[in-house]
Amino acid sequence: MGRLPKNKEMGEENEQLVKDISSNQLGNILKQNKEDHLNFEKRVEWKISSGSLLLDSALGGYINPCLLRLCGANNEGKTPQALEIVRNFLKDVPNSRCIWVLSEGRGLTKENKERCGLSFTTNYEEWQDGNIMIIEANIYEFIIKMIKDLVLKNEEKKIYAFVIDSIDGLILRNDVDKSADDAMKVAGPALLSKKMLQSLSLGMFKYGHLMILVSQVTSEIKLDMYSKIPNRGGNFSGGNALLHASDFIMDWQNCYNSDYILDNLSGKLNDGKSKPVGKWSKVILQKSAIETTRKQLISYPIKFGRKPSGIWREYELANLLMAWSMVTKAEKGAWLTLTDDLRNELKQFDEEVPEKVQGEANLKEYLESKPEITNYLFNKFKNLLSN
């Protein structure tokens, strides 16, 4: 039996030969089992805004292909926020479409659909890039097979946003006809969530798709089993599988009187003189890829009746301009000063950009009177945050 050469040069050659043999062996294994891995597939990347710059800043600047879970109190903004994310997805991601699984039949109201400015259909022949196909079904097996087929048999390379509204409405086909006596044996959201995540491979996100799951309140949520901090919003269905698999978990909180924005800044809700024109939507980021934002409470303003997005951009921009020192506040009094750099930047839209405005409310009103400036500043901050 031969021995390996002892000289240094031949030793290095043999070492390289062993590496080459191992690499070729692994390569052959991967080539012969392409259906079992995605190493040869190119990752699809994109970035979109949540619609709220304040929320974007907590999410790391943008949303990308991921599993996004929207939880919390009823009628506090989960569905409008999902629609806003989908709207930005369809607008900014080329070759994109959306499937909205309406498993409960009550989340996507007529008002929500009319306000968001998106096109909906229940006719597959009318489904096309840039619009939303509503699937009215709650049979788990059918929904999962539909999603898997669209993702894995995707010859046209479409990029999909899948919204399941909500995960609580799903049921196994065998459980549909069970009697009340068998109710306790019916598979619940936790089991179905686990089965769903096992069925949907990492191809979902490597191919650039987005999954949004809407969950309802049940009891207290705890990512840390030793945590004693109560959560005002409560807990959500889906079990540990969804806690582990979600990239972001947003928990909408109940809105109280102090959260409403009134047309009379010195008034109070229900005082007979003041009218609510908006509110501060409050979200706890229960889980995030950004460690410093976990358990962070984010408040962002909503303007009632605004289309297509209810997010009050002018309010957000007023806050951000001051936070980034583009607008400075006087030590005494309410006067706000726009920096020379900002004024020069905005003169392309308004030759008479004011040097000073009295108070944040007037800064907001100026932005509302100049939609081209609002759009310019929104895109400026969006790009700053995403980069």
Image: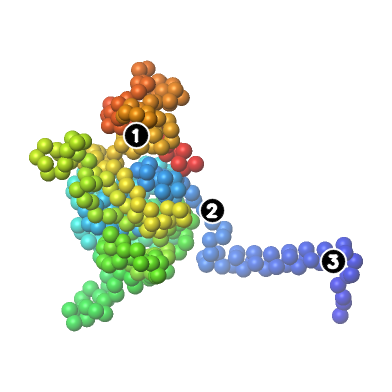
Q: Quadrant of residue 54?
A: top left
Depth check: 375 or 293 in front?
A: 293
Residue 308 percent coordinates (x, y): 27, 40
Q: Among all residues in the image, which is located at the extreme left?
A: 272
| Residue 318, disc | 1
| Residue 67, disc | none
Above or below — where is 319 with respect to 226? above
Cβ atoms under marks 2 and 3 closer than 8 Å? no
Instruction: Report the amino acid beneath label 3.
Output: Gly
Real-space Cα separation, disc 1 to disc 2, in angstroms: 41 Å
Residue 50 percent coordinates (x, y): 37, 46
Residue at image coords 42%, 65%: 244
Q: Nearer the viewer, mark 3 or mark 1?
A: 1
Q: Quadrant of residue 239?
A: bottom left
Instruction: Report the amino acid beneath label 2.
Output: Lys
Q: From the image, tell me which residue sits under label 2.
A: 42
Q: Among all residues in the image, which is located at the extreme right?
A: 7
Secondary structure under tag 2 reads: loop
Residue at image coords 28%, 63%: 234
Secondary structure under tag 3 reads: helix
Depth check: 261 or 130 in front?
A: 261
